[in-house]
Amino acid sequence: MRLSGFFTALLMAVTVVLSQNSLAEVARDLPEKQAAFGLYDSQRSDLRKKLESFRKKYARVHLGPRPFYLVNEMDESPLKDKLKRCENRRFTSSKFSIGHRGAPMQFPEHTKESYEAAARMGAGIVECDVTFTKDEALVCRHSQCDLHTTTNILETPLAQQCTVPPEFDAQGKLVNAADIKCCTSNITVAEFKTLEGKMDAANTNATSIAEYMNATPNWRTDVYAARGTLLTHAESIELLDALGVDFTPELKAPQVEMPYQGDFSQEAYAQKMLDEYKQAGIHSKRVWPQSFNYEDIVYWINHDPRFGRQAVYLDGTYNLDVTLAEMETWVADGVKVIAPPMWVLLDVNANGEIVPSQYALNAKEAGLKIITWTLERSGLLKDNGGWYYQTVNGDTGNTDVIDNEGDVFEVLDVLAQEVGIIGMFSDWPATTTYYANCMRLR
Ligand SMILES: [Ca+2]
Ligand SMILES: [Ca+2]
């Protein structure tokens, strides 16, 4: 035993010496080898970036307990059995899993912390909703005018710059809670960066600022809202790139008259959003620009076709009756990807099964790729699931087939397997990442 221990130690020592020698040789020869292979600095840095992003893609993803809980909550079915068999898998990031505003079920939306949580949960793409400040800097916010519900602006002196600032009576009682309105265009980017993100909510009956701000629904939480670091669009690009995830910026409708301050046109705004990716050296393949405004999509397709190729037309008409002929006009304009809300893609058949809607069938026939929104944004499904589930929960007259938390996977499975969506926006990406890994959706 002792002898074999000695030989093992000797072998290890020899190995270490040899590997140090060969490493030293490699290091010495590297400049020559690079010259021989014609690797210039920029190519080397490209290669390094690619390796880094490869490493991050396959870095350990952490899903937390929620997806496992949701699988357990499912009604018995072959789908449940299949999902259960994936419990011990090594989960990796998937572009099917899109972080909607980050991970806002539990983290303040559009903050560094929220984006990091989404990436950690395996979202392969993370969203920055894009709007602009008074000095025309692009920043991540869901709306140009939601600072009063998504940040702490009302408890700062910047509140006085709001479009509709808070007003108080002689006793100091807040008197206009329902009307308060604060926009990114009210402040400069430097001022924006001094704010803190909070969970998106407001009590519009409040009689104090504290009461107004303390309104997070009980199915979300404030436990991660101690700090929410706000980001410019450019900072979001840098962060998401470092996290190894791809990008889906949404150009939000301006709440100010365009051209803003006489010179910032809608086209300049749409172009500026894409230009910030070019300035950061991001390949267009990694960017899925979105807009509800059809003209923005057409602008990108015609003026910046590399980025326009993956432009996502968010169909916010909520019209279940869009015809195949109309969808074919989108295709003729160069649109390749559409994104209606998930209920538009779903229907319930006579057997009480969730099936693709006529809209979904038309979109497939037109050859459109489909992304949809938003999973995990509905509160408890035992309480019906609300707006996002309206065609499957009885709200629009169809049979109600939503009655427990596990139904989230029943819905996602129809969207993935039968509608054939290529991506799912989620407020808690872990749920979608779990499904994507189990079904091998990249
Ligand atoms: Ca969005
Ligand atoms: Ca059920």
Image (tube, rainbow, N blue to C red):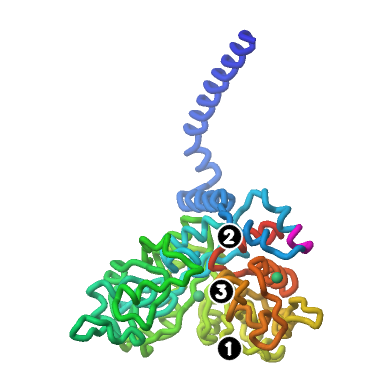
Which of the two marks, 2 or 1, is nearer to us in this view?
2
* Above or below: residue 396 compared with residue 196: below
Q: Amino acid at mark 3?
A: Ser
Who's the residue at 73% across and 61% down the image? Answer: 80
How far apart are the alpha carbons under marks 2 and 1?
29 Å
Q: Observer-nearest residue: 119 or 106?
A: 106
Asked if the magenta segment contains residue 330, the reply would be no
Q: Is residue 22 left or right of residue 264?
A: right
- Residue 319: image quadrant is bottom right
- N-terminal of the pair, mark 3 or mark 1, is 1
Q: Could you tell me what secondary structure mostly forms the magenta stretch?
A: helix
Q: Position of residue 130 (x, y in %)?
A: 43, 75
The span picked out in magenta is 77-81
Q: Is residue 298 left or right of residue 274?
A: right
Asked if residue 147 shows in the view, the reply is: yes
The residue wearing badge 1 is: 317
Give the class, few, some or many, for how many residues have Cα within 10 Å of label 1's Cα (few <14, many ≥20).
Answer: few
Q: Position of residue 387 (x, y in %)?
A: 58, 81
Say which element carries label 1: loop
Q: Amino acid at mark 1?
A: Thr
The residue wearing badge 2 is: 430
Who's the residue at 50% across and 37% down the image? Answer: 30
